[in-house]
């Protein structure tokens, strides 16, 4: 069965006012449109546009609850959430727990009697939240994972040189940072730096403000002209941008500890448990495990549980987690990860071409360009730009014809 879906974009303040509407050919609301959710998550379950074919269920969550066998086959939960994400400003610095830690944290907070909607609640469900972001815009800007400690030392060296050359140098502000490089081991250095920045206080506030002043005193052209500073020009520009959005936030300096990534259209990142990250600007397709567990680390007015965040972070210098596609069939790109919750497919067909795939369960398809015919083993449907379809498992192998681009999220399997 093919079930047509719709939803209203979430109006988070960092969202773009035009990007989602321009992509899908819809009418913009006039306010920020940050995320379009397509799934069964209780925060914003996708609407069913033809309720009569789902027994009157108004949304995917209601339908799964009422008739899980028809919607999902042999399982009882949709394990993934598909989103269109449109950032016109930075999201919070955040990380997600492992599955085991989510189970433990959810149980502990339940036992403590913390309401699910309490602002100091960390775990809204007993699930992990690994995620993939696929860039649709020409550039998609992000921070993800800790950069090498040697690079952090170099960045701090640049800032100290700028400080020494300034009218009002304040070298003592850097002492708490440089002292953190003394412990042996990358993990110790990174943990010490993050824990100190998250502790707040006068020393941290003074350092944040001074770093912002040092960066603001130089133009982008001047930074690029300096041999030592040029490799980190994008990171310094991020400091400038974050200071405008979140003045005084320790996350401004934390951003200098992280890999600064500029995805080109068609590139993707995989953010597993423990990877600290923040999306800064751009339009993308996001697929994740269907969880709402977020441990925040800055760039937000929301609750930050420092001990819990430190317990879930991976304090390692890792390469940028690019996720490269596989090509299992003609016209099909497959982005598969090391968890069974989801796989993301990008299917692009030209006239007179035919593509096919078989999902390992219920799937959700979103068309971002053109028009295609979908033929399953029990029925057929058309999907045009802006349309979304829930595809039940009994459709089996799906064949697509026409000219367009469709993203499909489905259950996956370990890579």
Image: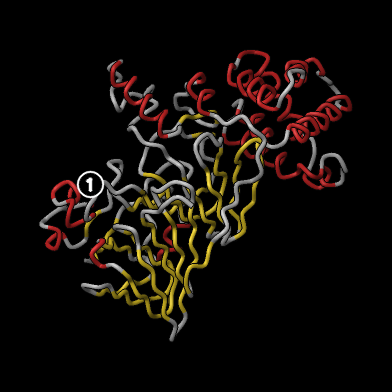
Q: Residue furthest front?
A: 414
| Horizontal relation, residue 123 to residue 231: left or right | left
Residue 197 lies left or right of residue 99; in this view the side is: right
Name which residue lies at 60% across and 51% down: 322
Residue 268, image x, y percentages: 55, 54
**Nearest the eye: 156 or 183:** 183
Viewer-nearest residue: 197 or 246: 197
Q: Is any part of residue 245 visible from this angle?
A: yes
Q: In the image, is 162 to the left or to the right of 67?
A: right
Q: Position of residue 284 (x, y in %)?
A: 50, 55
Name the residue tied to disc 1: 76
The residue depicted at 46 percent of the width and 65 percent of the height is: 346
Residue 373: x %, y % from top left: 33, 77
How crowded is the residue under tag 1: few (<14 C-alpha within 10 Å), some, or many (20+)? few
Which quadrant would the N terminus be assigned to in this image?
Answer: bottom left
64 or 356: nearer the eye?
Answer: 356
Residue drawn at 15 percent across, 53 percent down: 57
> Residue at point 57% right, 36% down?
245
Quarter occupied by residue 200: top right
Q: Secondary structure at mark 1?
A: loop
Residue 396 image offset from top left, x and y in percent: 28, 67
On the question of residue 32 being in view, the answer is no
Q: Quadrant of residue 125?
A: top left
Q: Please tell me whether residue 304 is drawn above or below residue 269 in the rendered image.
A: above
Of all residues, the one furthest to the bottom in this rendering is: 352
Image height check: is 264 above or below 90? below
């Amino acid at each position: 069965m093919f079930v047509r879906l719709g939803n209203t974009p979430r109006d988070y303040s960092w969202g773009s006012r035009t990007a989602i509407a321009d992509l899908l050919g819809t009418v913009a609301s006039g306010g920020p449109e940050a995320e379009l959710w397509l799934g069964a998550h209780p925060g914003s379950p996708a609407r069913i546009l033809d309720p009569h074919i789902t027994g009157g269920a108004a949304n995917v969550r209601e339908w799964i609850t009422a008739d899980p066998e028809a919607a999902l086959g042999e399982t009882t939960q949709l394990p993934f959430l598909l989103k269109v994400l449109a950032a016109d400003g930075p999201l919070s610095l955040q990380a997600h727990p492992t599955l085991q830690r989510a189970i433990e944290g959810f149980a502990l907070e339940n036992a403590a009697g913390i309401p699910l909607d309490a602002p100091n609640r960390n775990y809204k469900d007993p699930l992990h939240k690994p995620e993939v972001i696929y860039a649709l815009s020409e550039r998609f800007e992000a921070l993800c994972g800790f950069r090498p400690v040697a690079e952090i030392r170099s960045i701090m060296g640049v800032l100290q040189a700028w400080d020494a050359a300034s009218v009002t140098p304040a070298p003592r502000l850097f002492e708490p940072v440089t002292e953190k490089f003394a412990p042996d081991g990358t993990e110790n250095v990174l943990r010490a730096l993050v824990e100190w920045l998250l502790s707040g206080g006068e020393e941290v506030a003074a350092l944040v403000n001074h770093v912002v002043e040092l960066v603001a005193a130089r133009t982008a052209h001047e930074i690029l002209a300096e041999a030592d500073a040029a490799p980190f020009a994008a990171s310094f520009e991020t400091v400038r941008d974050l200071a405008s959005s979140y003045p005084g936030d320790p996350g401004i300096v934390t951003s200098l500890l992280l890999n600064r990534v500029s995805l080109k259209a068609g590139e993707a990142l995989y953010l597993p448990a423990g990877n600290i990250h923040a999306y800064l600007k751009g339009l993308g397709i996001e697929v994740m495990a269907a969880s709402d567990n977020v441990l925040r680390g800055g760039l937000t007015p929301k609750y930050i549980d420092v001990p819990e965040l430190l317990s879930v972070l991976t304090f390692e210098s890792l390469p940028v987690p690019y996720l490269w596609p596989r090509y299992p069939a003609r016209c099909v790109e497959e982005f598969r990860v090391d968890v069974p919750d989801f796989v993301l497919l990008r299917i692009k067909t030209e006239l007179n071409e035919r593509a096919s795939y078989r999902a390992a369960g219920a799937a959700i398809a979103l068309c971002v360009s053109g028009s295609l015919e979908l033929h399953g083993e029990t029925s057929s449907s058309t999907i045009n730009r802006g349309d979304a379809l829930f595809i039940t498992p009994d459709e089996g192998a799906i064949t697509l014809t026409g000219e367009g681009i469709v993203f499909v999220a489905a259950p996956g399997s370990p890579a």
